[in-house]
Image (tube, helix red, strand yellow):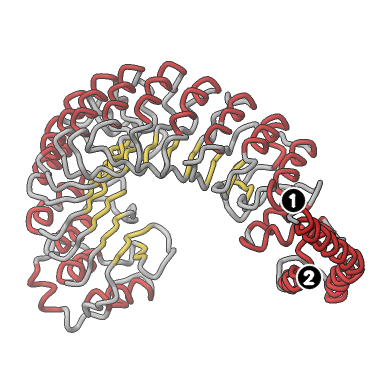
């Protein structure tokens, strides 16, 4: 079915071919129809192994790859092509030849992702496509052997592209394969070709063994906005070269270098120097799995104060108590930090969590989410967090564990949860409830925001906080059934209408209170005011008499 055919074969038969005869099911036939008809609403095709969406073309033995390639090639509306399929039935690669022959004629595809064990063959066969398609700006390559030959082909093709995004993963496809990047890392040819892409804005190299020359080459990509270099064995020299280059990148917003634990205090110091450069405007920084000890933390802290646009910081599985204490003072000076990920730092104890109060209590704190998942918090840790959050008006979400684990993993008992109960609602007085309680924290959960882990009483208070402005009102009504009006008597009857209106608002709040109970509160307030009227009148009469006496005394003294 996929024997070698030229373009004339398809052109002469396109009017007569029945789509159901060249596909394995109705969905695949419908995809071919949309491609054939240049359907403007159909802009993405996934060559997949299993069906998940109407755009998934699941490749089976009954599908003619030549016709699929032909319809992709002549289509002018297609913008995204994802090749994720194993191409079932392939034994002599003729199906890949037939498919790529047609794809190479396409001029509209902007985004191409190849993630299949036959990726090296696709790279070789799609040479004409890469050379002639000037629309392509996004290229992802993963899960296939990028050996020396394929790397050379890729380098040649990269020279003819105008990419804005490039993603290369050096991960093996199964447990029995070697790493697909050769032992010397990404080839010098590929890095040299990438360094010529001055318009490249987003790049991800994962587990690609980036050496010093590679880091130097990357330093020239001054238009970069997002750089991901996870698990690349970058060392101090590589980090210094990269930091030097990044110091002249005015548009870099995201830097993710997690897993490069060969970087020591010297490399971290170079990174901190970049943070303090005039060009640095990072919004996202990931330093997970970096083995940041106290010495490295001190070096990192010196640069954190320069990150005055940072919104997200990840130190997952990287630090200990001492390192956290060294970092938190400078974190408190970042007035834009909204999300902090400290998850999987199993060596952080209550002592380390205590130091977070410096951040929570800072006037510049705008932290909205703190991730402490996969850590043993314990009762002492819960107490430390609750004390630190007193008066904090920014944190809305506190993550404690993975959504698939039981709450026992975090090690918090009734004693620990009671600290959060006191934090969320002080009950010693109305003023304590209103002024000292935390009305901002809305969720204590796992990675999944909807999966709460706190006891019912704590969860109820968190739910009240999600009611925003009504939270203080609800907590007062729940914990103070009899409102004492006497402190308001000094304003006489002026406050009575305000109290009645306040109680009227309570009827529409999140507190489940019967109309009868609400009316009783109103009557109680009115009664206390009316009951206090005689004392108010007497006090008023005495006060007026005393004023008259003093006035007469002053007149007598002037005689």
How far from the left and from the top, in percent, is residue 144?
Answer: 29, 41
Of residues 161 and 281, the one nearer the viewer is 281
Horizontal placement of 243 versus 469: left or right?
left
Q: Residue at x 22, y 25 (%)?
A: 211
Q: Is residue 483 visible?
A: no
Above or below — where is 324 with respect to 172? above
How far from the left and from the top, in percent, is residue 309?
Answer: 35, 43
**Which one is in front in this view, the residue at disc 1 or the one at disc 2?**
2
Horizontal placement of 367 versus 111: left or right?
right
Q: Residue furthest bottom?
A: 16
Rendered image quadrant of residue 256: top left
Q: Residue at x 60, y 46 (%)?
A: 446
Q: Which mark is residue 97?
A: none
Numbered disc 1: secondary structure: helix
Of residues 7 and 517, the one nearer the viewer is 517
Q: Which mark is residue 493?
A: 2
How far from the left and from the top, in percent, is residue 1?
Answer: 23, 65
Horizontal placement of 253 versus 378: left or right?
left
Numbered disc 2: secondary structure: helix
- For label 2, the crowd category at 10 Å Cα-Cα, with few meaning under 14, some 14 to 19 and many 20 or more, is some
Q: Residue at x 43, y 30 (%)?
A: 330
Q: Residue at x 51, y 26 (%)?
A: 324
Q: How many marks?
A: 2
Q: Is residue 545 visible?
A: yes
Q: Pointer 1 and pointer 2: residues touching (CB < 8 Å)? A: no
Circle nearer the N terminus (1, 2):
1
Residue underneath mark 1: 431
How far from the left and from the top, in percent, is residue 512?
Answer: 78, 68
Above or below — where is 410 with respect to 434? above
Separation of residues labelled 1 and 2 (CA atoms)? 21 Å
- For label 1, the crowd category at 10 Å Cα-Cα, with few meaning under 14, some 14 to 19 and many 20 or more, is few
């Amino acid at each position: 079915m996929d024997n070698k055919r030229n373009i004339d074969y398809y052109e002469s038969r396109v009017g007569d071919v029945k789509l159901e005869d060249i596909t394995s099911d109705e969905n695949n036939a419908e995809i071919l129809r949309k491609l054939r008809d240049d359907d403007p609403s159909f802009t993405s095709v996934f060559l997949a192994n299993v069906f998940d969406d109407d755009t998934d073309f699941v490749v089976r033995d009954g599908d003619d790859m030549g016709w699929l390639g032909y319809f992709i090639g002549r289509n002018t509306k297609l913008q995204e092509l994802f090749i994720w399929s194993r191409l079932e039935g392939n034994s002599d690669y003729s199906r890949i030849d037939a498919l790529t022959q047609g794809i190479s004629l396409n001029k509209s595809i902007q985004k191409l992702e190849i993630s299949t064990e036959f990726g090296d063959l696709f790279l070789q066969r799609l040479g004409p496509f890469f050379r002639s398609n000037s629309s392509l700006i996004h290229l992802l390559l993963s899960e296939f052997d990028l050996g020396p030959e394929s790397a050379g082909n890729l380098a040649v093709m990269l020279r003819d592209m105008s990419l804005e995004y490039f993603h290369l993963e050096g991960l093996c496809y199964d447990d029995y394969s070697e790493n697909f990047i050769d032992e010397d890392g990404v080839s010098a040819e590929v890095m040299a070709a990438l360094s010529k892409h001055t318009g490249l804005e987003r790049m991800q190299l994962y587990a690609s063994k980036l050496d010093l020359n590679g880091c130097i080459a990357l330093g020239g990509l001054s238009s970069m906005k997002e750089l991901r270099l996870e698990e690349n064995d970058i060392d101090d020299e590589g980090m210094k070269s990269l930091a030097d280059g990044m110091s002249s990148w005015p548009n870099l917003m995201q830097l993710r270098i997690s897993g490069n634990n060969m970087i020591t205090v010297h490399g971290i110091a170079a990174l901190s120097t970049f943070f303090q450069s005039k060009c640095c405007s990072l919004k996202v920084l990931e330093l997970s799995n970096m083995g940041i000890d106290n010495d490295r933390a001190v070096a990192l802290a010196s640069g954190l104060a320069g990150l005055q646009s940072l919104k997200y910081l990840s130190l997952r599985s990287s630090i200990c108590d001492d390192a956290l204490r060294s970092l938190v003072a400078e974190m408190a000076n970042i007035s834009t930090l909204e999300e902090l990920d400290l998850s999987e730092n199993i060596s952080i104890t209550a002592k380390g969590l205590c130091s977070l109060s410096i951040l929570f209590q800072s006037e510049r704190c705008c932290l909205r989410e703190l991730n402490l998942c996969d850590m043993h918090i314990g009762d002492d840790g819960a107490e430390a967090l609750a004390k630190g959050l007193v008066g904090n008006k920014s944190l809305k979400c506190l993550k404690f564990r993975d959504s698939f684990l039981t709450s026992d993993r975090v090690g918090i008992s009734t004693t620990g949860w009671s600290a959060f109960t006191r934090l969320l609602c002080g009950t010693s007085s109305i003023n304590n409830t209103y002024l000292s309680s935390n009305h901002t924290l809305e969720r204590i959960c796992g990675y999944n925001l909807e999966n709460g882990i706190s006891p019912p009483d704590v969860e109820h208070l968190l739910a009240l906080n999600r009611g925003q402005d009504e939270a203080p009102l609800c907590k007062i009504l729940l914990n103070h059934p009899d409102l004492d009006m006497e402190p308001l008597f000094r304003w006489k009857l002026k406050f009575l209408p305000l109290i009645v209106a306040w109680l009227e608002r309570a009827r529409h709040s999140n507190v489940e209170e019967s109309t009868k109970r609400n009316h009783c509160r109103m009557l109680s307030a009115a009664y206390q005011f009316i009951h206090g009227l005689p004392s108010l009148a007497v006090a008023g009469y005495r006060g007026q008499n005393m004023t008259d006496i003093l006035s007469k005394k002053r007149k007598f003294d002037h005689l």
